[in-house]
Amino acid sequence: MKLTTKGRYAVTAMLDLAMHAGPAPVKLADISERQGISLSYLEQLFTRLRRQGLVTSTRGPGGGYNLARPSDEIAVADVILAVDENVDTTRCGGMGNCHNDQRCLTHELWTELSDQIKGFLSAITLGELMRNGGIKEVAERQDRVQQGGTTEVRVPIGSARG
């Protein structure tokens, strides 16, 4: 199984949206700039995410997107499935016709792996990811870069570790 760009970008964009959520909607152009994802691709993804009820949109000046429900109620699996991404590791798509229209020798193994992946991704919410210190650090760096700041880490003299 390989998660495609579509699934990766959808999760990345939704996490960015969750981290920048506030009273005003978040513009896709801002997500595009921070994450290096083309605006037209984000528009396609967010159309699907809106149809699946994960985001709401506001049109016009000052428009953009908001999460449709709290970040702790949106699982990573919800996002991946909303953009028609498949997390099935079987060769047959779970149909059981992988070897001469019959189950292959390892069908159960790949089915169980698919179930584990789905369970793992269903158990992680955007809210949980937002509380991850490493993710917060990356988001802060991206915000500084977007605002024209530096990505350098400055260590005060005398506090360097050796």
Image (tube, helix red, strand yellow):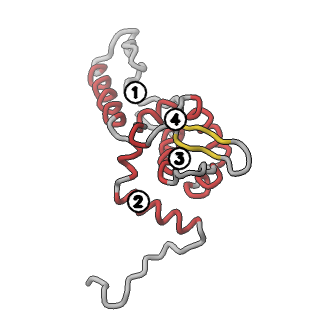
The image position of residue 102, as x and y in percent, is 35, 9
Residue depicted at x 53% and y 64%: 143
* Disc 3 to disc 1: CB gap under 8 Å: no
User: Looking at numbered disc 3 in the image, what kind of residue is underneath it?
Assistant: Ala
Pair 2/1: label in front = 2
Q: How many labels were placed on the picture?
A: 4
Left or right: residue 80 versus residue 63 is: left
Residue lying at 66% horizontally and 48% vertically, measured from the top left: 39
Q: Provide the residue designation for mark 2.
A: 136
Q: Distance between the Cα atoms at labels 4 and 1?
A: 22 Å
Marks 4 and 1: CB-CB under 8 Å?
no
Question: Which mark is first along the chain, 4 or 2?
Answer: 4
| Mark 2–mark 1 CB contact (< 8 Å) | no
Q: Which residue is mark 3?
A: 13
- Name the secondary structure under disc 1: loop
| First in sequence: mark 3 vs mark 4 | 3
Give me the C-alpha separation between circle 2 and circle 1: 30 Å
Please, what is the three-letter code of the amino acid marked with disc 1?
Answer: Asp
Query: Which residue lies at the image location 32% right of the left edge and 36% below the top edge?
Result: 123
Q: CA distance from mark 3 to mark 2?
A: 15 Å
> Along the line of sight, which residue is nearer the eye, 3 or 148?
148
- The numbered dot on residue 88 is 1
What residue sits 64% from the left and 37% below the top?
44
| Position of the N terminus by quadrant | top left
Read off the residue under disc 4.
Answer: 54
Residue 128 screen position, x and y as percent: 35, 47
- Label 3 vs label 4, nearer the camera: 4
In 3D space, how far apart are the residues under numbered discs 2 and 4 (Cα atoms)?
A: 22 Å
Rounded to the nearest angstrom, the CA distance separating label 3 from label 1 is 22 Å
Few, some or many C-alpha atoms within 10 Å of disc 1 (few <14, some 14-19, many ≥20)?
many
Instruction: Give the number of the mark in front: 3 or 1.
Output: 3
